[in-house]
Image: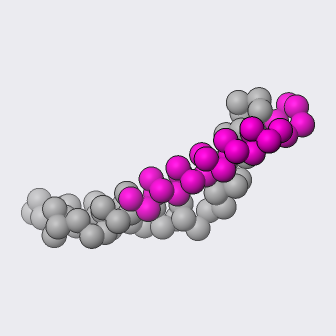
Amino acid sequence: MAHYLLKKIKLVLSLVLSLILVLDNSKILDLVFSSTGLYNEPQKLDQVIWKNFWGSLYWTLFLLTHLFFTHSKFFY
């Protein structure tokens, strides 16, 4: 029973992570940056660098999590 439940959890998490992949990451980042007030001034070079950094970090964490849940032997 626990094995079946873990497989279902793995499936749901994979589907959620795939949905996140389909979403436009720039819209998510724009929402985060506008809520923190960084868009109140004209965009500067350091803000562009930070936005690229957070975007790269976001996708790196997404891919590592997705690979863990889809290829980990723990869930089989």
Q: Is residue 49 left or right of residue 21?
A: right
Residue 10: give x, y in percent of width and height.
29, 63
Quarter of the image holding residue 69? bottom left
The scheme the figure's colours follow is: one colour
Quarter of the image holding residue 14? bottom left
Q: Residue furthest right?
A: 42
The magenta stretch is 39-64
Residue 42: give x, y in percent of width and height.
89, 37
Number of marks: 0
Q: Residue at x 60, y 46 (%)?
A: 54
Q: Residue at x 74, y 38 (%)?
A: 46
Q: Is residue 30 left or right of residue 65?
A: right
**Residue 50 drawn in magenta:** yes
Camera-nearest residue between 24 and 45: 45
Residue 21: give x, y in percent of width and height.
54, 65
Does residue 31 appear in the picture of this structure? no
Q: Residue furthest left?
A: 1
Q: Residue at x 53, y 49 (%)?
A: 57
Question: The C terminus appears in which quarter of the rendering?
Answer: bottom left
Q: Is residue 32 above or below residue 19?
A: above
Q: Which is the main secondary structure of the residues drawn in magenta? A: helix
Q: Is residue 27 left or right of residue 69?
A: right
Does residue 19 appear in the picture of this structure? yes
Residue 68: give x, y in percent of width and height.
30, 61
Camera-nearest residue between 34 and 63: 63
Q: Is residue 17 left or right of residue 7?
A: right
Q: Residue at x 72, y 33 (%)?
A: 35
Q: Is residue 5 above or below residue 37?
A: below
Question: The N terminus appears in which quarter of the rendering?
Answer: bottom left
Camera-nearest residue between 26 and 49: 49
